[in-house]
Image (cartoon, helix red, strand yellow):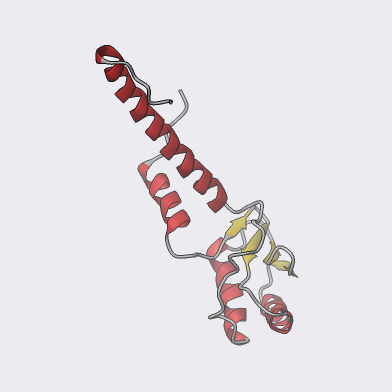
Amino acid sequence: MPDRPSLASVLEAVRESFGPRQRRTWMGQTRAHVELRDLSGDELERFASALRQAAEHRAQVKWVEVNPHTRRAVIEIERGAYTLGELVELVEAAEKSVGVDKAAFSETAAEHPADAEPLHRVGLFTVKIVTHYREVYQHCAVIFVTVDCDIFN
């Protein structure tokens, strides 16, 4: 039997899906993808320049690329050099330096393949359906014993 998710992981999925919008991130061993705010072309250029300048002062950052299509900053680092939180702070500092730190995140942009929120939404929806049909089935089982169940008509 597969392991059940912990209560903490379920609550985190609920928070991510229904709580206040958070910056979406992903990190592998040497590369991080950090979501960008919804910026105009000029703002994006200024931000990208500020992020590259900030990264130049970090010896273990190999390169930084701002991808306007995925709305992500991609940061290549030496293995184990930084935590995801430290790289998010680097992005936030660059945003603040060019005055775009209060801009919202896009709600209409395409989902990034590393985003967990779409999977959580589908998972929570599936749990709700399964729970609902389990209750319906249990209810019908009782009805079948006593009376005809026409719940599916």
Which corner quadrant of the image does residue 33 belong to? Answer: bottom right
Residue lying farthest to the top in this orientation: 145
Closest to the observer, 44 or 29 = 44
Residue depicted at 44% across the width and 36% down the height: 129
Closest to the observer, 137 or 8 = 137
Tally of marks:
0
Image quarter hosting the C terminus:
top left
Residue lying farthest to the left in this orientation: 146
Which corner quadrant of the image does residue 136 belong to? Answer: top left
Residue depicted at 46% across the width and 43% down the height: 124
**Residue 146, percent across and down?**
24, 14
Is any atom of residue 83 visible in this view? Answer: no
Image quarter hosting the N terminus:
top left
> As displayed, is residue 49 above or below residue 127?
below
Residue depicted at 42% across the width and 39% down the height: 128
> Along the horizontal axis of the image, is 89 left or right of 133?
right
**Residue 54, percent across and down?**
66, 79
Residue lying farthest to the front in this orientation: 153
> Along the horizontal axis of the image, is 145 left or right of 80?
left
Closest to the observer, 129 or 88 = 129
Which corner quadrant of the image does residue 53 belong to? Answer: bottom right
Residue depicted at 32% across the width and 16% down the height: 148
> As displayed, is residue 122 above or below residue 132?
below
Is any atom of residue 68 visible in this view? Answer: yes
**Residue 120, percent across and down?**
50, 47
**Residue 7, percent across and down?**
36, 43
